[in-house]
Image (tube, rainbow, N blue to C red):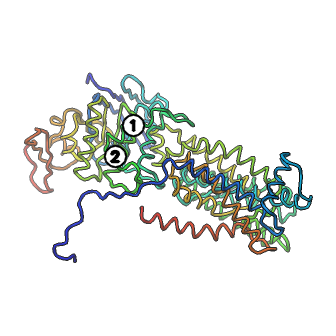
Amino acid sequence: MSDAALTARDLRVELGGRVILSGVDLDVPAGAITALIGPNGAGKTTLIRGISGLVPASGSVAFEGSDLLALGRRERARTVAVVEQELTSELPLSVRDAVELGRTPHRGMFGSTTDDSAVIEAALAATDTAEFVDRRFETLSGGERQRVHLARALAQQPRLLLLDEPTNHLDVRAQLSAFAVLRRLADDGVTVLAALHDLTLAASLADHVVVLAAGRIVDAGDPERVLTAGLIREVYGVEAVVLTHPQTGKPVIAFAPPGLAPSAS
Amino acid sequence: MPAAGARPTSAGPKPHVRRAPWHRSVWFWSAVAGVALVVSIVVSVGMGAADIRPAEVLASITAHLGLAEPQLTPIRDGIIWDLRLTRVLTAAAVGAGLALCGAVMQALTRNPLADPYLLGLSSGASLGAVAVIVLGASLVLPVTAFIGALVALAATLALASAAGGVTPTRTVLAGVAVSALAAALTSFVIFWSAKGDSYREILSWLLGSLGGANWSTVAISGVALVVIGVPLVAGGRVLDAFAFGDSAASALGVNVAGVRWGLLGATALLTGAMVSVSGSIGFIGLVLPHAVRLLVGSRHRALLPLAALVGAIVLVWADTIARTAFEPRELPVGIVTAIIGAPVFALILARKRGVS
């Protein structure tokens, strides 16, 4: 792929003596939304953590010409933002406090910088969180929390945004609104990589799909080409019918109950 | 069963408008607390067996600082300057240090029940102190208490790492084990060798007391507060990044391991110094950070200095109650902080119920 912004080569992650990922070659296109799909335990979370330096990884990870694994922590946090699954806080925290955390890598140990509030306001506006900026984080609904985490990531002003199951536990409306935020980001040139479980969501909202199974990349490309009944059978071990959305032309995946005869496609 | 025709409640998101009252009020609260601390010190120095007016307190202090001519009799001046003021200043420094350490420990372990004594520090210090008391060598007491605290901390960390790695949960559990052992050894020492007067001294040590305050305890606690506490307050804002856990902090570019060990070491030293002059005074480090969070939220650049100020005020008054309530007998201050602290903790708990 010629316009890949993020490229990983021969990425390998071992955790507690167990090989989670090995020989992963990943290309993520610039300024687009890429969905990372695969069954539980395939290594999606570990891949995201490996790319972002949260777990030690060997191999190479390059983003827009710089070696991510060699960057210092703070410098990397100014380039890459990560939204992990279901982060909660035990301590009372206002929404503004939570979003402000995103400025951490841009600040000195003791000081504050001048243009912080403009960046924070922009992050709040982009995620429609400005209206509850003074509420406490733990009083928010799941969808609102996810938007706050997105706002926090935006406050980092990243060039690369990594998300682990960002739509888990969200209702349909909240899922679509989260993706609307990601779409605007991608249109602004931010490279987005999101691990997803919902294949139809991945097919309809992502520009590019990467399929991970048992620590290896099985396929990658346009959703229309990659998401076939055969691939779903091979990777997930379930029978599915892949339909075409009458308006968008994107794949819609319908699952067959166990015992039903496999379809032809 | 709802009445027929009852309309379903609005389906949209409920606007739970409880505005946080803390934004932009940090300076206000700090100013209030600062003034309250100075007033508390002056007023509480005046309280006690010998009745002393605040004006006399100010006269004594200004005279000793060389700002005014001495006006008081040497006896009254001695009561103020050598007995009361040393005790009140030690209380202020210890209270500030304990509240500060509690706030830091709660953020570091993400455990709202964390306090400065979590890692066995207080029981280690008690063991060191009690051993010295029964040997009759009270002069080196602060030193052995401090050593006891550090040995307990080292044992806790060694146990946690032997158990498979120093994670917050394992560290806390190891602290529980070390505390229990040190407490048992302390009881054994008391059982075996304490008699007469040393019982009373040991009891006040275990429950926490400022009865032994003098200018050297002011120096120990004050220097520890300035040398360790001030950098802790200044650098503590990095703790904000831990709000969503270690991994999120790491993703924000924070050196998680470095910060954790740096702050853990600093709080251990500060707590050890405080315990060495006052014994283990409970509840200040556990309760006050929660109370202050209700005022100013969880941002540590506001929380830490304010927690220190409020800790100083509360311990000054708790100790004033301890030494005046049952005159001429003196209550160990730890009893007062527990009697005040436990209900306050229950109140805070009840307030939080609506949230989570």
Give the crowd class for mark 1: few <14, some 14-19, many >=20 residues within 10 Å: many
Mark 1 or 2: the one toward you: 2
Q: Chain of mark 2?
A: A
Q: Which residue lies at the image location 33% right of the left edge and 55% below the top edge?
A: A141
Residue, disc 2: A129
Quarter of the image for residue B178 reads bottom right
Q: Which mark is residue A81?
A: 1
Q: Can you say which quadrant of the picture contains the N terminus of chain B?
A: bottom left
Asked if residue A155 lies left or right of residue B221, the reply is left
Q: Is residue B43 above or below residue A235?
A: below
Q: Which residue lies at the image location 46% right of the left edge and 63% below the top edge?
A: B352
Q: Position of residue B80 (x, y in %)?
A: 83, 59
User: Foreground: A245 or B289?
Assistant: B289
Q: Chain of mark 1?
A: A
User: Foreground: B132 or A60?
Assistant: B132
Q: Is residue A233 above or below residue B45?
A: above
Q: Which mark is residue A187?
A: none
Q: Is residue A117 above or below residue B98?
A: above
Asked if residue B247 lies left or right of residue A188, the reply is right
Q: Amino acid at mark 2?
A: Thr
Marks 1 and 2 sit apart, C-alpha to C-alpha, by 18 Å
Asked if residue B126 lies left or right of residue B193, the reply is left
Q: Which residue lies at the image location 46% right of the left edge and 42% below the top edge?
A: A101
Q: Amino acid at mark 1?
A: Ala
Please identify the residue farthest to the right as the structure is shown. Answer: B74
Q: Position of residue B176 (x, y in %)?
A: 61, 61
Assign a secondary structure to mark 2.
Answer: loop
Q: Position of residue A102 (x, y in %)?
A: 43, 39
Asked if residue A7 lies left or right of residue B214, the reply is left
